[in-house]
Amino acid sequence: MKIEKGSLKELKQWLELNKITEVECIFPDMAGSTKGKILPVNRFTKSVEEESLKLADSVFGQTVSGKWIDESQIIDYVEEDVLMIPDLSTLKKLPWNKEPTAQVICDLYSNSGSPSLIAPRQVLNKIIKLLKDNGLKAIVAPELEFYLCEKNLDPNIPLLTPVGKSGRRANGSDVFGIDSVNEFDIFLDDIYDYCEMLDIGVDTLVHESGPSQIEINLNHGDPLKLADQTFMFKRAVRQVALKHNIHATFMAKPHQGQPGSSMHIHQNLVSYKDDKNIFTDLQGKETNSFYHYIGGLQEYLPDAMVFFAPYVNSYRRFVMNSSAPINTHWGFENRTVGLRVPLSSPNAKRVENRIPGADTNPYLAIAASLACGYLGIKEEIEPEKPIAGSGFERRHNIPKYLPDAIKRIKVSDSLSEVMGKEFITLFAEVKQTEHDAYQDVISAWERDHLLLNV
């Protein structure tokens, strides 16, 4: 946990070279939103030297709207603070602040020096360590979809697509449409520039099925680094959108009658000793580990659904023939199932988890997906046979609604064991509080259909 003196010297040199005046010390909360503290640069370096930067761990007892959970088995609102220890490998200069400002992602520790049991970044680190202890490491690559829309200041009014450089609004599907992407090329150029400054490895960009819906794929790599990049990417995209006087949303289903936005996660495991993909053998054939990994995803993904679809709105994606899967069937080059195996060279053999929405906390979605696969290998779970036809013709076997997902994670002893019982309990409490808040709202649909008809 201690930061070496050499690193501290390099840190001060970097801050001085970049003329940094303040530093944002941040971490992801349960929703994957940015929490933390902003410090003047001298106060920041002092806090690093003294390990004195603290914050109440009750921040993890907040919902996405900032509401505190009323009663918790885990959070005690008078407990001691947690230490925020900056991961200096994540230190970057922010491209959107006029005043020279740096951002650094922090790990959270108790005063005794042990990692926090309830911080999402530490939960992912726990899974990474579990794999390492078994001689394995994961490679992941997230694919993120998001919509562009006009600034929406009234939540009662449906979203409007923004006006592009042609002066027109997109109003229909144009999958892979180059001209549709070029409508916002100035905006997208800024995204590329911001990503370069933040060391976010962007692979490809396409126009997706919905109007003004964009997909950007990140380069594959270490799970923690990719979770950090996804965390920063979502923040950067929102900042670019504000610069152009529009909004960018990673909401899972922002438009009625249009496809939702996903965060597909490509994943495979390699040997820690020699970096060889354990999903294929020397002849390039799929191994037992490959099949058991898929078996684990099929077995445990429904229990982990709340990490892939964390809000009421998330479940609006999972409807027939809407580009989002409705079950955990798997297949080779099959985009209708929850688990797709892309055609690839043997050393790139991987599984694509197509269930997660763009609204997920990337640390938790990656951690949960790896945990499910790990359990499959550990328990030698045999998968069902791959399917070649449409997955939409098969039974809907994932939770359809948030309350169902909350119930499943609360009773999943296997996931509690690998991800942490305290964390699982607290996350379920937060999700239940969010659902209770949703239940308090009377919607326009209810007034429209029930007011005079019942």
Image (spheres, grey):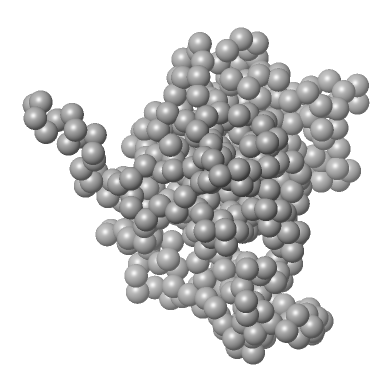
Find the residue positioned furthest to the right: 282
Number of marks drawn: 0
Please determine whether, in this image, residue 429 is positioned above or below residue 40. above
Please report the residue visible at 52 percent of the width from the left and 71 percent of the height from the top. Answer: 36
Q: Where is residue 98 in the image (x, y as percent from the top left)?
A: 62, 76
Q: Position of residue 307 (x, y in %)?
A: 49, 42
Q: Where is residue 173 in the image (x, y as percent from the top left)?
A: 56, 28
Q: Nearer the viewer, residue 448 or 267?
A: 448
Q: In this view, does 206 lie to the left or right of 284?
A: left
Q: Is residue 78 left or right of residue 208?
A: left
Quadrant for the N terminus in the image: bottom right
Please report the residue visible at 59 percent of the width from the left and 36 percent of the height from the top. Answer: 372
Residue 447 in sight: yes
Q: Is residue 434 left or right of residue 252?
A: left
Please report the residue visible at 68 percent of the width from the left and 36 percent of the height from the top. Answer: 179
Residue 406 in sight: no
Q: Which of 119 and 238 is in front in this view?
A: 238
Q: Nearer the viewer, residue 159 or 392?
A: 159
Please report the residue visible at 66 percent of the width from the left and 25 percent of the height from the top. Answer: 340
Please determine whether, in this image, residue 38 is positioned above or below residue 280. below
